Image: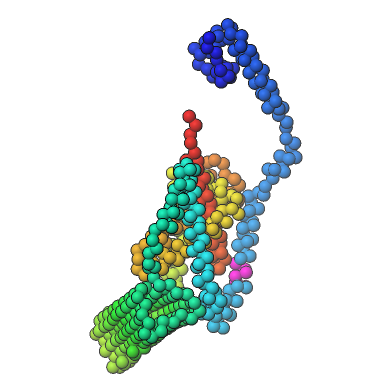
Amino acid sequence: MIHFDEMACLLYLEGQLDAARSRELAAHVEECAPCRELLHALESETTLLSSALTEENESIPARLLGEHTRRLPAWAWTLAFGVFAAGVYWLWIDGIGPLFDQFSSAGFGGTDLFSMIVFSGAFWEGWSDIMDAIQIGVVVLLAIVAIEWIRRRLRRSAAIAVVVSALLLAVALPQRASAADVRRGRAILIPAGDVVHNDLVVIGPSVRIDGTVEGDVIAFTRSLTVTGHVTGDVIAFAGGVAIDGNVDGNVRVMSHSMILEGTTGKNISVIANTLELTSKGNVGGEAIVLATDADLDGKIQRDLLGLFGRGDLEGLIGGEAWIRGGSLEVASTAEIRGPATYEGPQQPIVEAGAKLASPIRTEITQGMRRTRMTTARTAVRAVFGYAALLAVGILLLLIFPGFFRATLREAGSIGLPIGVGALALISGGFLLVLGVLLLFVGVGAGMASVMAYAPVLYVAHIFVGVWLGNRIRGESPDNTSAIIGRMALGLLILRVVELVPVVGWLVWLAVVLWGTGAVLMGFYRTSRLQSAPVPA
């Protein structure tokens, strides 16, 4: 005789067996004593377990309910925001604004103060250590993410095998030659007569190249001096740059000051506070110059694109010149062989004897008119930016409601999203800096690296805005129109606050960290829910 097991009996007691199987079990139990005893035992155990797990519902005291549901009314949040905005405005008008004016009058304007802190202080000396720490952090974070991804996608034994195999392969592969000669130190010197047969990357407070570099020179330093010969490009981020040698390629510099007394075979791109192209200096190609003060006494064989606070032209421009700035003086020794255009608040000063292919086409900009146009343009841009952000938020809510609500729940914890956003900012800082550097060099990958963070940073305001709307209007019901209304209110408040000088930047930074962390956590939660197995 075939007996029924415990699982079949439990399903029978729960009423989950099909009708034919239930009738078969009932008939069998009437004839089989062991199965009948098993069925009665399971029935007794089920009854005892159900009674043990069942307890009487006890009402919660009204006083506990009252304390738990107590919250500030909506008008209190509105009043608090109004008082905060008025206090910020008063603080700026009567405190911070006049203080900044006094600093500017004393010679500590934004550009000078930034240059002094970054290029002349201890911050610049420790910049290489900071970059090393960021690189190490990024590598460790990427390794953790990769291992976690492999572990979740594969079985544990397979994941361990993949990781160990990759490590063994990395150890077994022969070490290739370094792609560049990297040197670090407080005073780096390439003596005259020495030849570096590779690209040269130098990091340190002082760098001097008197010899020959058969490749590119990439420098992160406070002071860079090149009196030798560089067959490739010179790319420098420095406090001061002086080039008195020969550079066969391009010169791309971001510096506080730059002096060019030597020759460059191709183009120069300079962002500096002061630029001096001496009479011995020669640029074989084009020149792009963004500088507060620019003295161009040497030769630029092709076109010039210049944005100057003050420009003094005494040398040669072999092609077209397009200049925009505060003032321009063209000396009698100057020569411009192509058409020239100048845009500024006053007429350029052109001395007699200057050789011009044609009169300088001048466009005078009116300061007041420009200020009004800028203000109007800013207001229009703010309105359209607010409308676009609101539209994106509505689309996210309608198209991805699960992700939207998951991210909104994560934003409610405040502290954890800010921490995650700060971690993402630190780990992504190196990638952003690398993207900007690549973009400055001219590699298209730089633009892709920078733009990869744009969508997350853009939608960060949306979820913080909804959270702020909920605090003012109260928690929204699970209703699309109510969420949209609170989103519109919160985004409007954030936009207004971010227009306040200084405080607006601080609020923007806090919102970006907060919202970015919430978006990343929302992505994580949503992906976990979607990847969870569906029970059969």
Percent x, y for residue 157?
A: 48, 43
Q: Nearer the viewer, residue 106 or 135?
A: 135
Percent x, y for residue 459?
A: 47, 54
Examine the structure image and report whether residue 340 is included in the region drawn in magenta.
Answer: no
Q: Is residue 535 left or right of residue 354?
A: right
**Can residue 315 be spotted in the picture?**
yes
Q: Please, is residue 528 above or below residue 534 in the view? A: below
Quadrant of residue 450 within the rendered picture = bottom left
Residue at left offset 28%, top offset 85%? 336
Q: Is residue 211 left or right of residue 463?
A: left
Quadrant of residue 104 within the rendered picture = bottom right
Q: Please, is residue 364 above or below residue 58 in the view? A: below
Q: Please, is residue 324 above or below residue 416 in the view? A: below
Residue at left offset 48%, top offset 50%? 147
**Can residue 342 be spotted in the picture?**
no
Q: What's the magenta bit mostly, secondary-structure-wise?
A: helix
Residue at left offset 54%, top offset 48%? 408
Q: Nearer the viewer, residue 234 or 369?
A: 234
Q: Magenta stretch: give its range.
A: 89-94
